[in-house]
Image: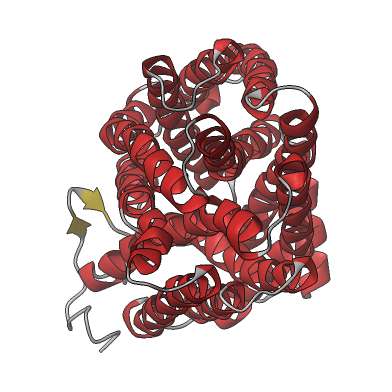
Amino acid sequence: MTSISAGTVAQSRFLGIALNDGVARGHMQSFYLACYAAIMLATFIPQTQPFLLDEVLGLERSRQGVVSGNLNFWGEIVIILTVGLWGGLSDRIGRRAVTGMGFMLIAAGILLYGLVEDIPSLLLARVVYSAGIAAVSTMIITLMADYASNASRGKATGYLGIMNGLGAMTAALFLLKLPAIFKGRGLDASESALATYGSMAIVTLLIGLVMFIGLRKGKTHASEERAPLLKQMREGLAEARRPLIALAYAASFVSRGNLAVVGTFFTLWASVYGTQELGMSSAEALSKGGGVLAISYMASLLSAPIFGIMSDRIKRTSALAITLLIGAVGYGSTFFLQDPFSVATIACLILIGMAEVGCIITSGVLIAEQAPDRLRGSIVGLFTLCGAVGILVASIVGGYLFDHWMKTGPFVFFGAISALVLVWTLALQFRHPDAAPST
């Protein structure tokens, strides 16, 4: 028996996805649970951070943008230092072990968030949490490539986008309300933080246990002779000289940077505007901002299947170009916004939600297709590394623009980045017809 949930007979298809040999329905169910949980936890932490900064630590609002950016910066430094290791390690000890370990680290980091008393302790929590996010993020794309056949990867990644949308909506509609819920029951800010993060740490720990049970056992290519880990990583880095892999890395930079901008700076914008202009508490503004974000995530959820199907039907560079265009328009249009709760903001967030999931899906399908099997773990690790650099840039530049230019500055900046990568994509798609979907 491969796992408790997998049964004894391998299935060739799951929800219309053609599966690779040895992959059972239970493995796919566990994989999509990981997709759901990963985005839920990746959005939960940065989006609740304004509550900690404002009500628990009492940080002045004029510094919150830079401090938020700095926390993201050091978190991404951890990701940059560990993500390649996770990818290579998964080729050696198995995807299941690395995925489970990742969720365990996330649980530890979330628990530390509930115990923070100052900025250094908050930084420690972010470092532990980020090491876990690096492991899980690397495994998501790697598992998708391992489990789904190339012809079905667009559809498989479309379902991944759906689970991402559901996870992000869970964070926006429910998890962001937890501090206000606990405060409404009579707890003070510190007690509410401990209750919020402590309960989520328990949930994350349970998810990690499910990963150890439900994902496929063993190493994907255990029978192949393995090069030393450092040599394998050098070989994976050398693959970046291939134009389509380099483009996928750039798209990962954009897609993960987009997530950082929305996850970190929208709730911070909502918190500052709500407290300064509307007289709300930070917890109340966070709850209201979560409702607005949920609309963006609903757009992600509804458009994810479209981008997945599109990735299988047209050139994969063309699919990527469409998502980058939507992102450039959505992010760039925030230049004209001032109120995070306005109808115009909601319209921009709908485009942003579509661009986020679209770029994740189309870039993920492209890298899964282009990565050789022997180096897949390492290449996807570097793919995730480029996403970490995108988050790093979004954090530092975005934090400065938020505090010193305009509250939508981080969004406008990444609109410009999306436009630049769009131009690169359009140039490459005419030069490389092999980016068409495999049939």
Nearest to the observer: residue 319 or residue 182: 182
- Which quarter of the rendered picture does the C terminus lie within? top left
Query: Is residue 140 rendered to the left or right of residue 175?
Result: right
Q: Residue at x 62, y 54 (%)?
A: 54
Question: Which x, y percent locates residue 198?
Answer: 46, 79
Which color scheme is applied? Answer: secondary structure
Task: Residue 389: tell me if it is visible.
Answer: no
Q: Is residue 290 above or below residue 31?
A: above
Q: Residue at x 55, y 32 (%)?
A: 273
Q: Is residue 118 above or below residue 276?
A: below
Query: Is residue 69 rendered to the left or right of residue 186?
Result: right
Q: Is residue 197 above or below residue 8?
A: above
Q: Residue at x 44, y 38 (%)?
A: 361
Question: Which x, y percent locates residue 60?
Answer: 74, 48
Nearest to the observer: residue 428 or residue 108: 108
Question: Which x, y percent locates residue 317?
Answer: 52, 23
